[in-house]
Amino acid sequence: MPQRALCQLPGGRQARLWEVHRSCGTSEQQSTPRGVPPCLVLMFNLPQEMDLIAIAVRQTQGKGRGGNVWLSPVGCALSTLHVSIPLCSQLGQRIPFIQHLVSLAVVESVRSIPGYQDIDLRVKWPNDIYYSDLMKLGGVLVNSTLMGDTFHILIGYGFNVNNSNPTICINDLIMEYNKKNMTKLRSLTVDYLIARSVTVLERLIDIFQEKGPDGVLPLYYKYWIHAGRHVRLWSEEGPLAWIVGIDDCGFLQVHEEGKGVESVHPDGNSFDMLKNLIISKQQ
């Protein structure tokens, strides 16, 4: 993986560019061990002050939660980001919040652009980006490894920017908004939104590390699609509950009549929007 470029970023940070033509697969001719993604090799050999992002134009073996296949046509923003989080920090004690921060960063990267604040992008617990409450157009997958007193976190995330299939994309929403409101908002590019989402995520992590969940939850609730919704738990005939919010660890809080408030862990559970149902991924 030859180094292609080196540039200076604001604040004295450096950006290095490597071009890699294969994704997570490896071959005998590569210098990485068989089955080990090149990005992992880079991640553990970077200087401590540097992080890593891998950007793909297209994926052929995209993965979602629970082993689901993630379709990745040209026009998607596709990247894997490495961040280091100290175990003893606010976020290090609440690692499940990472996926919420990434989903929020994608939504905020669009809706914080002047003029684009009413583009109806939203967050869905635990790790999805939605158009209103109607259609998914992005998702997040987080893997963490604790080494010593530091979490090394690989954040894979993808969202539709300029591809109308398989669902809908951000530029479709912008075009529809322009027609409805007689505006002339420009279409957005994949590179631009990846850069903005990473910048926003850095800011959200800094806020979380300083203020904890209370520093980011007001913005999260501004964009999330679950306010005041009732759901069935575990099956279509399961108990009825009302969504309350996110607890201090990033778990979904629901109120079941007669039982009070309980937390639902994001790992192993999924929110079926069509059925208003929280189900176990193992089912």
Image: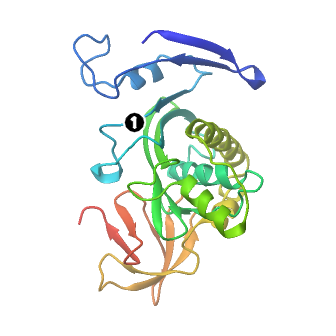
Q: Is residue 138 found left or right of 279 in the rendered image?
A: right
From the top left corner, tell me how far across and down residue 5 is, in percent.
58, 12
* Image position of 87 with respect to 48: above or below: below
SS label for mark 1: loop
Q: Residue at x 63, y 38 (%)?
A: 192
The answer to which quarter of the image holds residue 213 is: bottom right
Q: Residue at 65% across / 44% down in the picture? A: 205
Can you give x and y, in whole percent of width and height, for residue 17 in the image? Answer: 54, 18
Q: Quadrant of residue 197?
A: top right
Q: Position of residue 57 (x, y in %)?
A: 44, 33
**Front one among 130 and 169:** 169
- On the image, the x and y values in percent for residue 164 come to 45, 54
Task: State the scheme by which the image is colored.
Answer: rainbow
Which quadrant, please, contains the N terminus? Answer: top left
Direction from residue 122 to residue 113 in the image, left or right: right
Q: What amino acid type is highlighted by mark number 1? A: Arg
User: Mark 1 = which residue?
Assistant: 58
| Left or right of 265, for residue 268 | left
Q: Residue at x 55, y 33 (%)?
A: 83
* Quadrant location, the C terminus: bottom left
Write the residue at 50% across / 52% down: 96
Q: Residues within 10 Å of mark 1 (few under 14, many from 20)?
A: some
Q: From what the image shows, is residue 226 above or below residue 218?
A: below
Tell me: 31 left or right of 117. left
